[in-house]
């Protein structure tokens, strides 16, 4: 066994932050290519325009999607109970997301291989679904986590989830789904402004002027609604104890999702960043500073994801059916040793990943033009 | 296969895993072949090697997209369909999967975009580096996945924790350097190299048979022949290493593969062919090679290889020992301060999984009858005839690949590219490496039954708490969706191969590819 220089509580808090980093990494990088996918029918009408939009993300979407894969892997390794509960609980929703995500790699690669209009229309539809469905479902999933989801454990810690696909589609969760669609759509539109010109860029600019205010309104609505929701407060959690979710007690409390903002005022930074980032992105697009706008919208996304995270803290997945079964940062992690081994792996590889991803983006800098995609019809998507 | 939760979950896993592995071996093999061809291009500056890299790269791209697409399902279905497994062993099993993402999949996926889109944006050496990074990334991916799979076969470096009701990591070193994992990794990537080489060999043979793109096809065939010969030799040698690992870690799987019911005096005979009978527990009409199994499995003349009947008896002992662990575990769960119970649990913890086998018959294993215990011990025998035959077919194919690539190497080194019989054989051998690889996975995974984690967690306990209708929706959904994609994929590969390098790449000057002018040949 490797000697571990941190206590269990510290490692668990570090991993809570790292989980946030991975989810934000996913939402910021894969977010713009999901956004381009869901905007595809709106901003690109002709085949050349579609190819411009697709090729703007063509070389990078694959690497971006690994943030999602890595997010899944990290939850498996660092939060096995969450991995087990979330993916089996949201079973059919997860199946929908998988089908939608599978449409992306094949859509990108197969679309340009046949020059038939209907063939391409089919893959365009696939790319739209591949952008829209995951964006919506991830938001819906967060909306359900914020309200608590119906599961319980037996004595062997075998989990049973008592709700189906339709139970996930409640009004608050759908509102969160729309927040997510608007957020990733906005991010995708700004990416297209940065990487394209001509009609695609012009339509993306119009999309920004709709999506930025829409996101602000939806986010504010979700916040007001969340403030009135009944939430959960954990008692008797041992931050250094074994990961046994049944060892604590939990009470329901009105307005519990707002509780942390009073206890830890610095957490108010999260919603502030969400609003400020989105406003700044909108303003910077008007000033034609697309690069900075993309950065600002990335900050906005960071704020939105962080808002969900800090509102729930210490919970990650509360249970509405048997509140004591709710999974928290302190009783749903892997062992002390595993958290440490995974921290070492993350410390070595995340900086490397950021460095070579940055290198790849710098090689690919510049706009994708109609002239380029028409000249390279054999080598580009 | 029964239409119940565990049966359908297994069907779904088998289907999605085997489907995923239609694409993985070609990615593993072709990525290295692309790097080799591009290296020749950079060293010699001859344009045709660039064309070769780009054309085979185009086929690689179609296949890679499907590998990535189907891999997403693989990663998430441990959570969706095997939630108790994820809870029970995620502390260990999740680590190699996450490290795979961090170390390998990110590398491969980030640079694969530059491989396709970076030709005009980078220097020759820069692009070559990118291609090598894709190849290294995809092979490192295989390493970590097989470390995870190796742990399922030989769960070293972990202990059971009664507080959390799960296995927890003790030694990452033992998990990474697990001998089963290491043997599996080299065997599996070699199988991928054989697949990549066969793909190039068969397609090149088809071009030569049709008199198309001769210059291109000859060079491709030469590369495939050398690479394939080395790969087919190593897949067989390293497969033997993987088999040797069974001798120590998965005795039941070995005995089942060999349909060896009784423990024979050392060195045991190797049954070349025969008809294993599960009911009668014997192998009829066996053709045996004296001493061969003892030599292969133990690499000695004096060590015995235990037979199925003895292993069942041993399993029954372990179930009884496991019941002591199970009883102690309940005592510890009721009273955490019960140190005597903790000691009993520690003493028998290695057999706890064997007591869990009884949950197929009774809710509380401690109430099992002697007949149920005997039945559970019998359950540790996987299905012998299917393992016996799939293993022999796989090994036979392995030897066939050595012969085929040796012939290809012989003809290529003598520049004889017009042997029609050989070219036809090479073209028609295309599906065989895929068949061998799928058979290999069947032997590895079906041979591990009834366990999902050998000796630790039975498969039927590993599932999520889902309903049969849930599973019917996803199983039929995947069948429909995956079948459609398979048709599209094959259609595109065939279309691209038929187009050939000149049209698929939009090249203006076909002479260097097609051998239209004799002086273009070297």
Image (cartoon, rainbow, N blue to C red):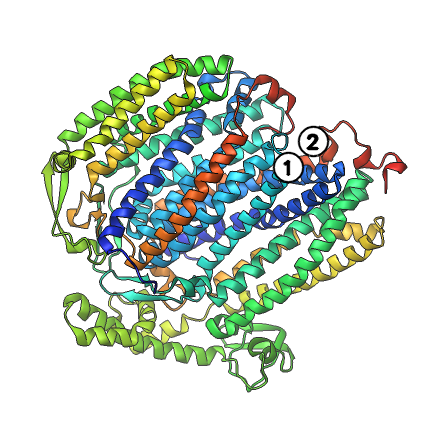
Locate residue B260, reporting x and y percent: 54, 77
- Image coordinates for residue A102, horizontal then vertical, percent: 47, 37
Q: Which residue is mark 2?
A: B505
**Which residue corresponds to the image point at 21% horizontal and 44% vertical from the top-left?**
A315
**Residue B168 appears in the rendering:** yes
Measuring from the top left, give residue A158's x and y in whole percent. 26, 56
Name which residue lies at 53% across and 62% down: B184
Side of B164 relative to B429 (left or right):
left
Above or below for B339 versus A274? below
Q: Quadrant of residue B389?
A: bottom right
Q: Earlier in the sequence, mark 2 or mark 1?
A: 1
Query: Which of B354/B367 is in front?
Result: B354
Please name whichever residue, B259 or A174, is drawn nearer the observer in this view of the structure.
A174
User: Residue at point 49% right, 41% down?
Assistant: B69
Give the left or right position of residue B66, taking residue B431 as reference: left
Q: Say which chain tag 2 marks.
A: B
User: The N terminus of chain A lies in which quarter of the figure?
Assistant: bottom left
Q: Write down the residue under mark 1.
A: B58
Real-space Cα distance between discs 2 and 1? 9 Å
Name the residue at 46% across, 72% down: B249
């Amino acid at each position: 066994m490797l000697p571990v220089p941190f206590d269990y509580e510290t490692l668990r808090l570090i991993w809570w932050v790292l989980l946030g980093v991975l989810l934000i990494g996913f939402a910021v990088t894969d977010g713009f290519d999901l956004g381009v996918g869901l905007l595809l029918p709106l901003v690109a009408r002709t085949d050349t325009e579609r190819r411009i939009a697709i090729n703007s993300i063509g070389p990078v979407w694959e690497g971006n999607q690994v943030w999602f894969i890595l997010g899944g892997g990290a939850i498996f390794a660092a939060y096995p109970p969450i991995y087990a509960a979330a993916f089996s609980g949201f079973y059919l929703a997860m199946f929908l997301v998988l089908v939608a995500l599978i449409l992306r790699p094949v859509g990108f690669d197969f679309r340009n291989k046949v020059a038939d209009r209907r063939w391409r229309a089919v893959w365009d539809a696939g790319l739209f679904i591949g952008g829209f469905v995951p964006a919506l479902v991830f938001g819906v999933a967060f909306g359900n986590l914020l309200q608590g989801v119906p599961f319980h454990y037996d004595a062997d810690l075998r989990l049973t989830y008592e709700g189906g696909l339709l139970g996930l589609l409640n009004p608050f969760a759908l509102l969160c789904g729309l927040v997510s669609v608007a957020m990733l759509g906005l991010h995708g539109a700004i990416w297209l402004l940065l990487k394209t010109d001509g009609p695609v860029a012009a339509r993306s600019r119009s999309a920004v002027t709709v999506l930025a205010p829409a996101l602000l309104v939806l986010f504010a609505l979700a916040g007001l609604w969340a403030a009135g929701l009944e939430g959960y407060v954990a008692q008797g959690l041992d931050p250094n104890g074994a990961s046994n979710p049944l060892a604590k007690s939990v009470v329901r409390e009105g307005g519990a999702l707002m509780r942390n903002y009073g206890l830890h005022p610095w957490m108010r930074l999260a919603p502030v960043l969400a609003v400020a980032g989105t406003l700044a992105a909108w303003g910077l697009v008007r000033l034609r500073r697309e690069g900075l706008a993309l950065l600002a919208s990335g900050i906005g996304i960071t704020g939105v994801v962080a808002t969900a995270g800090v509102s729930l803290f210490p919970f990650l997945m509360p249970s509405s059916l048997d509140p004591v079964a709710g999974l928290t940062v302190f009783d749903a992690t892997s062992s002390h040793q595993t958290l440490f081994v995974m921290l070492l792996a993350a410390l070595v590889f995340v900086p490397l990943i950021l460095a070579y991803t940055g290198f790849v983006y710098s090689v690919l800098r510049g706009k994708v033009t109609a002239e380029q995609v028409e000249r390279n019809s054999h080598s580009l998507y | 296969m029964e239409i119940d939760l565990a049966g359908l979950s297994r069907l779904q896993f088998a289907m999605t895993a085997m489907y995923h592995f239609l694409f993985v071996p070609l990615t593993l093999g072709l990525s290295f072949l692309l790097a080799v061809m591009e290296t020749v291009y950079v060293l010699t500056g001859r344009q045709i090697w660039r064309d070769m890299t780009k054309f085979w790269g185009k086929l690689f791209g179609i296949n890679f997209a499907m590998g990535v697409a189907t891999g997403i399902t693989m990663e998430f279905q441990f959570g969706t369909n095997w939630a108790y497994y994820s809870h029970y062993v995620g502390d260990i099993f999740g680590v190699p999967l996450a490290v795979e993402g961090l170390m390998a999949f990110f590398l491969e996926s980030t640079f694969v975009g530059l491989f396709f889109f970076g030709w005009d944006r980078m220097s020759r050496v820069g692009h070559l580096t990118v291609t090598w990074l894709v190849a290294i990334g995809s092979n490192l991916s295989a390493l970590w996945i097989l470390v995870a799979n190796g742990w399922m076969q030989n769960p070293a470096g972990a202990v059971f924790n009664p507080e959390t009701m799960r296995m927890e990591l003790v030694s990452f070193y033992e998990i990474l350097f697990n001998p089963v994992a290491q043997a599996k990794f080299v065997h599996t990537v070699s199988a991928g190299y054989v697949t990549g080489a066969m793909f190039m060999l068969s397609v090149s043979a088809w071009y030569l048979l049709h008199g198309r793109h001769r210059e291109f096809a000859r060079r491709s065939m030469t590369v495939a022949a050398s690479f394939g010969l080395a790969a087919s030799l190593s897949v067989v040698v390293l497969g033997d290493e993987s088999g040797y690992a069974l001798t120590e870690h998965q005795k039941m799987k070995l005995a089942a593969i060999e349909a060896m019911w009784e423990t024979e005096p050392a060195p045991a005979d190797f049954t070349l062919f025969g008809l294993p009978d599960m009911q009668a527990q014997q192998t009829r009409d066996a053709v045996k090679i004296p001493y061969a199994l003892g030599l292969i499995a133990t690499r000695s003349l004096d060590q015995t290889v235990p037979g199925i009947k003895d292993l069942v008896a041993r399993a029954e002992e372990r179930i009884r020992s496991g019941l002591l662990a199970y009883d102690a575990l309940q005592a510890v769960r009721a009273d955490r301060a019960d140190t005597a119970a903790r000691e009993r649990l520690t003493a028998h913890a290695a057999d706890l999984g064997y007591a869990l086998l009884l949950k197929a018959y009774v809710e509380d294993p401690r109430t099992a009858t002697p007949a149920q215990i005997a039945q559970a011990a019998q359950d540790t025998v996987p299905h012998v005839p299917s393992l016996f035959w799939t293993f022999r077919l796989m090994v036979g194919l392995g030897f066939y690949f050595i012969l085929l690539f040796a012939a290809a190497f012989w003809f290529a080194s003598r520049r004889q590219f017009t042997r029609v019989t050989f070219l036809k054989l090479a073209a028609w051998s295309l599906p065989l490496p895929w068949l061998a690889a799928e058979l290999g996975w069947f032997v590895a995974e079906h041979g591990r039954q009834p366990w999902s984690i050998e000796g630790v967690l039975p498969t039927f306990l590993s599932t999520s708490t889902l309903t049969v209708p849930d599973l019917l929706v996803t199983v039929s959904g995947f069948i429909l969706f995956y079948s459609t994609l398979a048709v599209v994929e094959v259609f595109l590969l065939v279309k691209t191969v038929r187009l050939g390098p000149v049209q698929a790449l939009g090249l203006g000057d076909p002479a260097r590819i097609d051998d239209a002018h004799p002086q273009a040949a070297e």
